[in-house]
Image (cartoon, coloured by chain):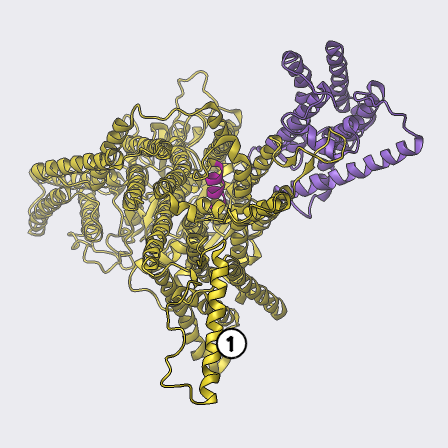
Amino acid sequence: MQRWPVLLFLAWACFLFFSGIGLFTSGFLLMRIELTNRSSCSDPLAAPAWAGQGVAPGACWMPQRVTKAVLLIIDALTFEFARFDPAKAQPRPYENKLGFLHQLAGSQPRHARLYRFRADPPTTTMQRIKGITTGSLPTFIDVGSNFASYAIEEDNLLGQLVENGRRVVFMGDDTWDGLFPQKFFRSYFFPSFNVKDLHTVDDGILQHLYTTVDGGEWDLLIAHFLGVDHCGHKHGPDHPEMAKKLTQMNEMLRSLVDHLANDTLLLVAGDHGMTETGDHGGDSEKEVNAALFVYSKTPLFGAHLPKEPETIPQVNLVPTLALLLGVPIPYSNIGEVMAELFSGDGGAGLAAFSQLLAYRINAGQVDRFLHSYSLAAQDLPAERLRYLRELFSAALEEHDRLLVQVREGLPASPKQEARLGQLVGRFQHYLREARAMCMESWARFHPLRMVAGCALIAASCLLCCVASELAAALDFSYRSRLLYPLLWGLAVAAVLGLAHLLTREGLDLILVVSWSAAASQLAFFWHSWGRRPRRRLRAWQGLVLPMGILFIRCCAMFSDSFVVAEARVAPFLLASLAILLVGKVHWHGRLTTLEAPKQSPGTAFYQKESWRLLCLLAVLLTCLRLSGLFHQCREEIPHCQPSPFLAPLSSLQSTQAKNLFYLLCVVSLAGLVYAVRCWLRHYGNLNSASPLVLFVRWAFPLLAVWIACYWAVTSGAEDTLGKLQELVQVALVGFPQAIYGLASLGLLLVLWTPVTVFVKDSRESVGPIVTPYQGAPSSQADLQHVIPQIYRRMQESLKTQLDRGHRRATLAAYGLGSVYSAALVIVLTLLGLLLLTLHSERMSLAFLLLFLEGFALLHHLEACSVTLVSLFLSEPFVVPWYAVTAWVFAATQFFYSTGHQPIFPAIHWHAAFVGFQESHSTHLLPAVLVGANTFASHILFAVGCPLLLLWPFVCEVPNSQRRKLKKELREEVQEEEEEPMMEMRLRESPERFSAALLQLGLKYLFVLGVQLLACVWAAMILRRHLMVWKVFAPKFLFEALGFMVSSICLLLGIFLVMRVDCAVSAWFEQLQPR
Amino acid sequence: MKDTEIKRLLCAHVISVLSIILTTIVPPLFLENFSVLGTHLIWLCICSICVTTVNIILYIILKPNPSSKRISFAHKVTRFLKCCVFFFISCILFHGIIVLYGAPLVESVLETFLFAVLLSTFTTLHCLCMLGPNIQAWIKVFSKNGAMSIWDNSLQITTMCTIVGAWFGAFPIPLDWDRPWQIWPISCSLGATFGYVAGLIIAPLWIYWNRKQLTYKSR
């Protein structure tokens, strides 16, 4: 049996998928690290005071220039909406509706100005709010300290204001509530979720806006209108409804301006634009092109009036607003101050100085941020950083020289003014370069990488499919199919590595890996071209059913509603597959006996086995339905109540209910352990005295008892135990750690001695017949001793002679027929108990259900394949496609039924603290615990995958017994020829066994890979979709991670089978000499 | 012989289709506020009753599987009672399967049950009319070579189309389109109805198309 080539081949296939995933992820998921540093007033960044400009008390970094500000965010206010073109004769519904802005800007050019406000992708509201408040470029994953909530951890404008004692009042979109919990002095939140609802949020704001403004109890007032955005989503911009909405906004602005005081700054901003269909989220011109309007009743701007509205990046709002309000700029800001707003009504010279000061502070802050960021992460290119550093220090030197001159009191000369202007230009240049660099590394999709990643995954799927076809043929040569492609891949990797070394460019590991993966794939296809075995049409017919269902499942990945509802889609499809299989068996008449005795000829009866099949189907469907009890909720599903089983027992109020549920959990745990023991005993794997069997006999119940004790400790209320508090703390840590320890001991034992076979030797013992006697049988006592021995010996020899008549003395090995699956079942139970500990108590019911469903599914598939096998496939070594598909669906279904959802807030973070009360020192252990909790069903089903191959052999016993019974009835003469071989049939043809394992692994990878491909594709195509960051991207991440976990566990499962095979070979060899 | 049979089949099916169409058109004339979507439960009842009556009348007129034996009146009555029991059991079975497929267990029980009744009318009632309360005959008909006449073939086709239609009807439920017909069980029952109508139309055409290949063993 070829063990290593099979494992290597599968590992190689996994590697191909991984490289595809990596490549796609590097193009799709933009990553950035969040720094937790905060700016404060005492930072030395504040420049030494300029002549004549002392920093006023209460303000920091720069004197406060406006006392109050109103920030109106009109969601999706595109620049096109805000601009007014009087020349247009027939404006479209969204054009020329905000006439009031135009009127203000026209009549008071020093008070009001309109800008193009460039949003940074991803243009989704939450990311944009983060951008407008932190001044950074939020990506999809901002790696921060806290994944569990959406709250902004980075330093931000609101945080700074609150810290400096300002009052921030908010009204509108309730997204802000999640982002800034407890930050607002007063707040009026309105639900933002229903996109179809155009008015709730806006009307709610209008109710409170004017009274709040007049009340004056605020320093910054933020109002976030959603109507325009929702109108875009519902009707698109080119719709009369949009005209109504914009007119309403216009009226709102008009009356708001009447209410404003003289020292108040009004900012009207769109957080992003929208496409022609009203969507946003991507980086197209229309989506990033928003509007910003600035107004104050005191003059703000210089006399200079630009022809066209200027374009300013969105992040520029943050430093500007911070310095205007006299608070420190948030630490991670990379925006640039809007200099015009600092000119004020002073003279030209003073204005220039105050602008320079703003730039100086801004540049210093950005430099400080880049420095700390480059210490925390390596994703900014080092060369660019060095170049920026040089720019900054040069500008700083020049600045200091100028400062000295001004201090010395030299008269302002035109030359000095020119130098001033130049210096401002240098700071500006520095800030823009810094921002451009950050943009390049944080905020850009790489379409080429995404497409290439997709192509790699698709090619890997194809490879799995082709290879699984080829593996069925016996002439599968690992040399041409595995060795050459591997060599090709290594060669390409080596060449690329050398090239990088020679050119001294930074080595992009992902690119190298994916190039080598692509090369090895090409080599594989090159070598297997033209060697396809011809399949008959009938064989293809068997594929229609599983592939059709799989196709439907893949299509479902492209709709956000179906991804949201996947918890119900997966069991629906699995149930359909199971029922259709039975229907197919029925259709081909395999359930009925044709020779119905003594009835009218047109009738048919079900066989006895058919009833078994129908019962299995019923059990399977019931399991599927019951597993729906354990679902977690997503916020997208209205009126959804999360399953009560998800909450820990300690959260239950009533003691009676708590006790009842505790009892139920313990019963289900005991049932699980007992069922496994029963199964093992049934197949005779509990008889031997090997360490593993002893472990199963004694440690399984012990594990169960410990888990029950742990539950008892955790579910008790904290205060009732009073004095035992310390003991409880010890138990909380001790029990889980003991469970981990014992379970890993068990896993090691399985690897060490996986054989659970009991041997009973009935051959002749070659000992002396009687004990040699010394001298003559002198006494009666001696005779009494000898005679029984002689009698026993005679009896034995007589018996063997009689036996020799038709059977030689044999070895009886109990449990040899199920030796492979026994090891797998033991491992699965251990893993199950381990994973169950990581979940909350009542999830043990879900795990019991998982094992039950797995068992029913295996039997169901076995029964179907036995009846269908003669129709489509001739070899029993081939696991049919529908079995693999059903197995994968069951894994997906139990991902949801163990209380998970593919969104970040639904991750069970508490799993990281099972057995570890304090915080962890490393990130690895909690990641492993949480990962194991999240992908529990993926792990179990992937490890158990080889059972699909083994089960038909295990189930051989009852069938052959039945056959035997029939035979005995008919002809009683030939009764001893057929012994059930069970899994030893696999050992008889080791070549086919290894090929079958390889084929099974490849099929499993294919089915998983096709789903992954659909997910990746959906994320790529729908990257402009409204729901991409809420639904598709998290789904992709979970699917990719699930794929990785599954494939690794699949390798482990197959490795385990091979280890058992090794051990069985050794066991046979040991048997030979005896 | 065969052509006349096919014509009779076609006639029967056209009448069935018309009756279903009439269930949507006629009731608004008598009932206020009636619409298929708005008062779906009433429509379900009307449709089930109408299809049942039409099927029974057609069966009495056409007698697709005439038996030569003379049947006593008492036998007829027991037969009818048996049919009723069978129908009821099939409703319960369908209800169970629908719930196992993911329909809510407690809330909207009535909707689910009426949907099960509708499915039973489209499938079981047909079987009862054609084959009588004889499970063995049913099992036989729904296998590869089990059809004994064109009536059996049409039975196979309409039943499968109904089930497949109901299955596809479940697909739009999770979508967020906010349409009135996405509410349980409207899309499924509409799917089943469309499937049934499609089956009624397809069956004679398919049989006509394949009339050369179709050979039936005698009973």
Q: Which quadrant of the rendered structure holds the N terminus of chain A?
A: top left
Q: Which lettered chain is shown in yellow?
A: A
Q: Position of residue A1036 (x, y in %)?
A: 39, 41
Residue carrying label 1: A719
Which residue lies at the image location 44% right of the left edge and 68% below the top edge?
A699
The answer to whether any part of residue B194 appears in the image is no
Q: Is residue A258 left or right of residue A609?
A: left
- A980 vs A536, nearest the viewer: A980
Which residue lies at the image location 9% right of the left edge and 40% below the top edge?
A501
Q: Position of residue A771 (x, y in %)?
A: 39, 79
Please state the total of marks drawn on the protein image. 1
Which residue is most to the bottom?
A779
What amino acid is found at the position of numbered circle 1 in the picture? Asp
Q: Is residue A2 left or right of residue A349?
A: right
- Quadrant assignment, res A71: top left
| Colour applied to chain B | purple
Q: Which quadrant of the rendered structure holds the C terminus of chain A?
A: bottom left
- Quadrant assignment, res A86: top left
- A1055 vs B107, nearest the viewer: A1055
- A732 vs A438, nearest the viewer: A732
Q: Position of residue A707 (x, y in %)?
A: 48, 67
Question: What kind of secondary structure does the magenta stretch mostly adopt?
Answer: helix
Q: Is residue A886 left or right of residue A148?
A: right
Residue A244: in magenta span: no
Q: Which residues are magenta?
A: A882-891
The answer to whether any part of residue A14 appears in the image is yes
Give the secondary structure at mark 1: helix
Residue A888: in magenta span: yes
Q: Is residue B8 left or right of residue A414?
A: right
Q: Position of residue A508 (x, y in %)?
A: 19, 40
